[in-house]
Amino acid sequence: MIEVTNFDELGTFENDWLDAHYHFSFAHYYDTRKMGLGPLRVWNDDKIRPHSGFDAHPHRDMEIITYVRKGAISHRDSLGNEGRTEAGDVQVMHAGTGIVHSEMNLEDEETVLFQIWITPDKAGYAPGWEMRTFPKTAVTGALPALASGRDIHSDVPVLHQDAAVHGGRVDEGETVTHELGAGRAAYLVVSEGAVEVNGTFVDTRGSASIRQEETLSIKALEDSEVVLVDVPLS
């Protein structure tokens, strides 16, 4: 079963520095039909204007994945971590027992990113932060993992959950597959371009909530970028 949501159907928030679109209920936006998917609780599509951003604020017991699509975001936290994550790269923050952080666009251009929150498999992990850079060339065969709690031996940030974030660019006409398996679900967002997922059309910045589909075939109808979160349903 594949349920498509178009970009203009998402929840919204805008102020003088942030233009946000919410895939699931978040902050003032509440929709009983959009409460997450398994342990996936938040997926925000954020545009952050230059020289602005999220000032220091606390979190706990959440895996927070930031995938930068354009520009860069600069991170600083109460553990002393600092870093700058550029377009195509990923940072993962383990909020655990508690962390205070800021995420700022210090650039002269707009930053565009996905902010993805996944609940951990238990409370009380040690807080932490890590970042990885990834090749910017188009992928073939399958979408590579960007962060994962499923294959802890891979060279990607580890999630404290039986979940994984996959993503990459796919050239027009190419098809990649993802083996989802039984008892699992996926949430897929097309950050650029347009694709077909098992024959179902998903347009630019639209999403597909996927259940009861053990194998996904993702065909790029034009040069595209896709991000997918694979989660357990139980």
Image: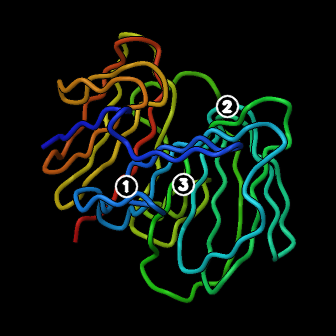
Task: Answer with mark 2 or mark 3, whichever residue precedes in sequence.
Answer: 2
**Residue assigned mark 1:** 24
**Residue assigned mark 3:** 147
Mark closer to the observer (2, 3)? 2
Q: Count neighbours of disc 3 (C-alpha within 10 A) and say few if under 14, some if 14 to 19, many if 20 or more.
A: many
In-image side of 130 versus 46 (left or right): right
Mark closer to the observer (1, 2)? 1
Which type of secondary structure does the marked residue at label 3 adopt? strand
- Residue at image point 40% right, 47% down: 11
- Residue at image point 54% right, 68% down: 63
Task: State the quadrant of the C terminus.
Answer: bottom left
Query: In the image as oriented, which residue stretches furthest toward the front?
Result: 16
Mark closer to the observer (3, 1)? 1
Check the image and report above or below for 30 versus 125: above
Name which quarter of the figure residue 46 lies in: top right
Which type of secondary structure does the marked residue at label 2 adopt? strand
Amino acid type shown at disc 1: Phe
In-image side of 71 versus 162 (left or right): right
**Residue assigned mark 2:** 70
Task: State the quadrant of the N terminus.
Answer: top left
Check the image and report above or below for 38 versus 212: below
x and y, in percent, of residue 124 in the image: 56, 89
Q: CA distance from mark 3 to mark 1?
A: 21 Å
